[in-house]
Amino acid sequence: SQYAAILCARPSRTHPCHATKRPSRPQGAGGGTGAARIRAKKKGPARLREVEIDGLVVLKIIKHCREFLPEVVTGQLLGLDQDGSLEVTNCFAFPKDDSAEAADNTAQYQREMMVRLREVNVDSNTVGWYQSSYMGSIHDPAMVQSQFNYQSQIRNCVCLVYDPLRSNAQGLSLKAYR
């Protein structure tokens, strides 16, 4: 997995997490940037540079992961992908289901949630998923397969991993992988 930049939930642009260095724009032969930028945009979606997470999303993830400690929980991330910046504006938890029809039930739940969110004008674009982790135990075949499935459908998607046991007063253990 490749680490993507993650921004904290603080709104201040002076906070060290928000101090991101923007890549320089390519210069054309005449010194202008217009033609080079247009050609670059035609190649496809911009490469992901940063992930901006709404504070409410962070709180929802923390609450969900701590409620089911020590079980691994997952959920869907919703938001917008704009010019290399992934904005996560909402999320919802996947239900815990240990039955034989778990995959079908989860898929049905996702469809129903997306319809309900669209009805109330909430960003309903899937931009990734989140998962809990305990003491850094995240790199397993199921996680890699899930991320592969998401990336095959959504180019700039991320997996946010929250570790409630490593989070403390000094910091939040929340990482973004792609």
Image (cartoon, rainbow, N blue to C red):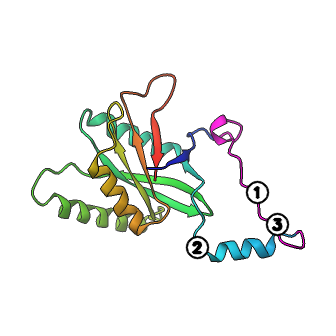
* Image x and y of residue 162, in percent: 40, 39
Q: Quadrant of residue 167?
A: top left
- Residue pictured at 36% horizontal, 37% vertical: 63
Which residue is farthest top?
Answer: 169
Q: State which region is magenta.
A: 12-31
User: In the picture provided, is 118 more to the left or to the right than 40?
Assistant: left
Mark 2 → mark 1, Cα distance in angstroms: 19 Å
Q: Main secondary structure of the magenta part?
A: loop
Earlier along the polypeptide chain: callout 2 or callout 3? 3
* Disc 1 target residue: 24
Q: Relative to the observer, which residue lies in front, 34 or 74? A: 34
* Disc 3 target residue: 27
Tell whether position 55 is magenta.
no
* Image x and y of residue 13, in percent: 69, 41
Q: Relative to the observer, which residue lies in front, 32 or 50? A: 32
Mark 2 → mark 3, Cα distance in angstroms: 19 Å
Kind of element beneath mark 3: loop
Mark 1 → mark 3, Cα distance in angstroms: 9 Å
- Residue pictured at 37% horizontal, 31% vertical: 164
Q: Relative to 148, does residue 39 appear above or below in the rendering?
A: below
* Image x and y of residue 76, in percent: 37, 55
Q: Which mark is residue 44?
A: 2
**Disc 3 packing (10 Å; few <14; some 14–19; many ≥20):** few
Mark 3: amino acid: Gln
**Comparing labels 2 and 3, the label whose residue is closer to the camera:** 3
Tell whether position 26 is magenta.
yes
Kind of element beneath mark 1: loop
- Residue pictured at 45% horizontal, 65% vertical: 125
Residues under numbered marks 2 and 3 in contact, where contact means CB atoms less than 8 Å apart: no
Earlier along the polypeptide chain: callout 2 or callout 1? 1
Kind of element beneath mark 2: loop
Residues under numbered marks 2 and 1 in contact, where contact means CB atoms less than 8 Å apart: no
